[in-house]
Amino acid sequence: MPDLLLELFSEEIPARMQAQAAKDLERLTVGMLTDRGFLFEGIKAFGGPRRLTLAISGLPAEQKDVREELKGPRTDAPQAALDGFLKKTGLTKDQLKVEKTPKGEVYMAVIERKGRATPLVLAEIIPEVMAKFPWPKSMRWKAGDPVRWVRPLHSILCTFDGEVVPFEFAGIKSGNSTRGHRFLSSGPIEVRRFEDYEAALKKAHVVLDAAERAEIISHEIKQKAFALGLEPIEDIGLLAEVSGLAEWPVVLIGTIQDEFMDVPAEILQTSMRTHQKYFSLRDPKTGKMASRFALVANMVTKDGGKEIVAGNERVLRARLSDAKFFWDEDRKHSLDSRVERLKGIIFHAKLGTQFERVTRIEKLAGEIAAKIGANVEKAKRAARLAKADLTTGVVGEFPELQGVMGRYYAQHDKEDGEVANAARDHYKPIGPSDAVPDAPVSIAVALADKLDALTGFFAAGEKPTGSGDPFALRRAALGIIRIVLENKLSFPLNVSGELLTFFADRLKVALKEKGIRHDLIDAVFSLGHEDDLVRLVARVEALQVFLKSDDGANLLAGYKRAANILKAEEKKDNKTFTSQVLEGHLSEPAEKSLFAVLAKARTAITPALEKEDFSAAMQQMAALRVPVDAFFEGVKVNADDKLVRENRLNLLASLRATLHQVADFSKIEG
């Protein structure tokens, strides 16, 4: 079957937009083909510095004939509704049918379209795709022309079955030619199919596939670093970005002057990464950053890249001189002296300045430290200094180094080691792959920082929504959960009910990978008095194990049956049945047995939960399985005698209350 090849060739596309642009090109084209009844065998989309490419294999030569019926407005609907339907279908009123429905007579349009040759359909939809393209930022590049593209568009290559698909967009006519590397090739390149195209581009010094470019860069950096006895410091984000900057990547190695090597490695790495897109290298024997860096050029030169390296070294020298200046100037003032400057930094209009926030965190960190066995004074000291690096020149230039620089400055000021480390670690964990702090003082400050943000923003009405979380409160909650669980801290959150529900939702996310059921988390949280996450998770895990057993599954089924009966009878009687059972009104052996076992279970479950012996609590519930089954097999709940009926309903309410000591079983699925 024939294939489609499409290339949209332009000036340089920002690296950050390329991957999504390739996906959008594929998504929009597939959507329009599908709407027109097309199927195909395979599709590939590519994004690069100067081109977006789409290759679709196995398209039919012709579109299938289409017959569809569209339901229109009622025959008595306003004229405007009918006019809109006629415009949509392209028919006249005489061409519509009238069909009777339960809601009255409606117009029906029967549309029959004979399939057209695929190139004709492609010539129609590709300009539509281009016109709808969702670039984050785009531009007009021709005076008086409203058409927009990410950068000036130069050419459109479009072939189907090796022949040009003729159409026009922004005054550019489609053809079968493209261009290679801006400097390492010359003249147009004519192609017919994807295989010709990809091979011809490679000869013209263009690697089409971003993944292949990234692999080339990664391999070359490793090889050239190894030759120097070094290794690259992994940076996946930078690799993805740089692979979008060079069509023909060439890795070169440069040198950092010795005068900059006493600057903290994080400053050097961040400066090189942010401003110059350089990869840092290190000595694998010491783990320390080396005085070398790797750069990716988009050029092959006769001198082997010497001039390129020299030029980049000059630029880097200027960049690092600025960084070194900030580092040297910042150390002239202690962190403690900078705390007052936080009064001039607004944290949030409703929550005050950073200084006011630090005051809150300092108090909270001391309280948490006392609860978890950390040094209270060190925790308070660390909390006081933790935000002071926000006033430094380095953090002003590189905001991502906040916390990291706080530790360096604290060390320079001869602060206690635990205090310095807490200044660095109190932001952690920043993401799911980031380690959580494990030192007691760091834990106290990290929890205080995140709890202050959550309670403050919730109180200010700045809660996350389905469409956004501008203050990263979900991340803060997940951070607290990870810190508490991974350090096994018996630590009550002491937050509002609304915020506790928010934690419950985040806990489901955090425990999903462990296979913990979300409904069991709801069942335990619904009790309303459990905010110790370690204890809560232990209870949930024990409950999950119990419910996987035959006793657990059958008891849950018995509970559901009891709950359904109670729901129906409570609605009928307009009352809630209590667990106050009159033993003298019990006559059947099965109900007497259930009453006795429930009494024993109730008195045993509570102390087991208090001792956090959740396995023992589950064993008590397991003992209920047989008498519950026997009750439903041998006892008529809705007896003719009203007193007997009410007593039996109270017995079921007693079962419900007993199980609710462990969890709200009504929240459990199954």
Image (cartoon, helix red, strand yellow):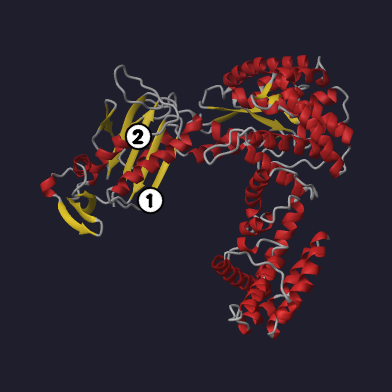
SS class of the residue under badge 2? loop
Q: Amino acid at mark 1?
A: Gly
SS class of the residue under badge 1? strand
Q: Amino acid at mark 2?
A: Lys
x and y percentages locating residue 359 in the rendered image: 78, 27
> What is the crowding at mark 1: few (fewer than 14 residues within 10 Å), some, or many (at least 20)?
few
10 displayed left or right of 163: right
- Above or below — where is 493 with respect to 598? above
x and y percentages locating residue 622 in the rendered image: 72, 73
Q: Residue at x 78, y 37 (%)?
A: 285
x and y percentages locating residue 300 in the rendered image: 51, 26
> What is the crowding at mark 2: few (fewer than 14 residues within 10 Å), some, or many (at least 20)?
few
Instruction: Kindly indicate the quadrant of the structure image that contains residue 276.
Output: top right
Distance between the alpha carbons at the discs numbered 2 and 1? 23 Å
- Above or below — where is 131 with respect to 670? above
Q: Is residue 262 visible?
A: yes
Instruction: Kindly indicate the quadrant of the structure image that contains residue 572.
Output: bottom right
618 displayed left or right of 190: right
**Residue where numbered disc 1 is placed:** 42
Q: Residue at x 62, y 56 (%)?
A: 518
Position of the C terminus by quadrant: bottom right
Q: Residue at x 66, y 82 (%)?
A: 630
x and y percentages locating residue 226 in the rendered image: 68, 36
| In contact (CB < 8 Å): disc 2 and disc 1 | no
Q: Mark 2 or mark 1: which is in front?
A: 2
598 displayed left or right of 135: right
**Residue where numbered disc 2 is placed:** 132
